[in-house]
Image (cartoon, grey):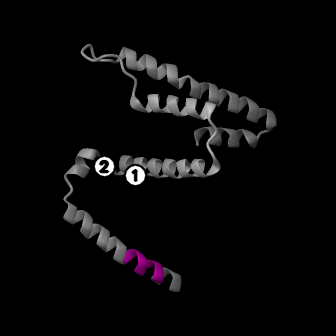
Amino acid sequence: HDTASVVGAAAAIGENSVEVAATLKVARTIWIVPLVIFSAWIFRNQKDNFGLPLFVVLFVMASLLNAFFEPDAAFTSYLKLINKICLLTGLFCIGTQISLENLKTIKIKSVILASSVWAFIVPISLILVQKI
């Protein structure tokens, strides 16, 4: 999304600006990989072995898979849906400061009650809004 906003802003100026902006943004983005590897190596604990964050390993694997195999459109749309759900869930959890530890303390009765109230109120609200 960040690259798209840079390209969009550059498009308002001109076509040459788009080429320069996109090239610089992609170059900056690519430099994240060596920076993460170097940071992980510098800030490792003496007791722990050197390790990369899991998201970096998964990102590199996904990039390699995408470079060598072209998925069909149905699979791509499925991945985009999963991507959107995960991104929204992550942003929601960051914004509300919810952690896995907090979620583990919630009792199932509370979840059932909240889901029931939500399932009851949402259709009624939709009906009322459509009638107004």
Callouts 1 and 2 close, C-beta under 8 Å? yes
Mark 2 residue crowding within 10 angstroms, few (<14) / some (14–19) / many (20+): few
SS at badge 2 = loop
Mark 1 residue crowding within 10 angstroms, few (<14) / some (14–19) / many (20+): few
- Label 1 vs label 2: CA separation? 8 Å
Tell me the quarter of the image containing the N terminus. top right
Magenta residue check for 80 = no
Percent x, y of residue 132: 52, 85
Relative to 116, say whether 60 is above or below: above
Q: Residue furthest bottom?
A: 131
Relative to 108, say whether 41 is above or below: above
Relative to 77, say whether 69 is above or below: above
Residue at 22 percent across and 50 percent down: it is 104
Tally of numbered discs: 2
Percent x, y of residue 84: 51, 50
User: In the rendered structure, which segment of residues is drawn in magenta?
Assistant: 121-127
Residue 109 seen in the figure: yes
Q: Which mark is residue 92?
A: 1
SS at badge 1 = helix
What kind of secondary structure does the magenta stretch mostly adopt? helix
Q: Quadrant of residue 118?
A: bottom left
Percent x, y of residue 11: 75, 41
75 left or right of 21 in image? left
Kind of residue indicated by mark 2: Ile
Residue ID for mark 2: 98
Kind of residue indicated by mark 1: Phe
Residue at 36 percent across and 21 percent down: it is 51
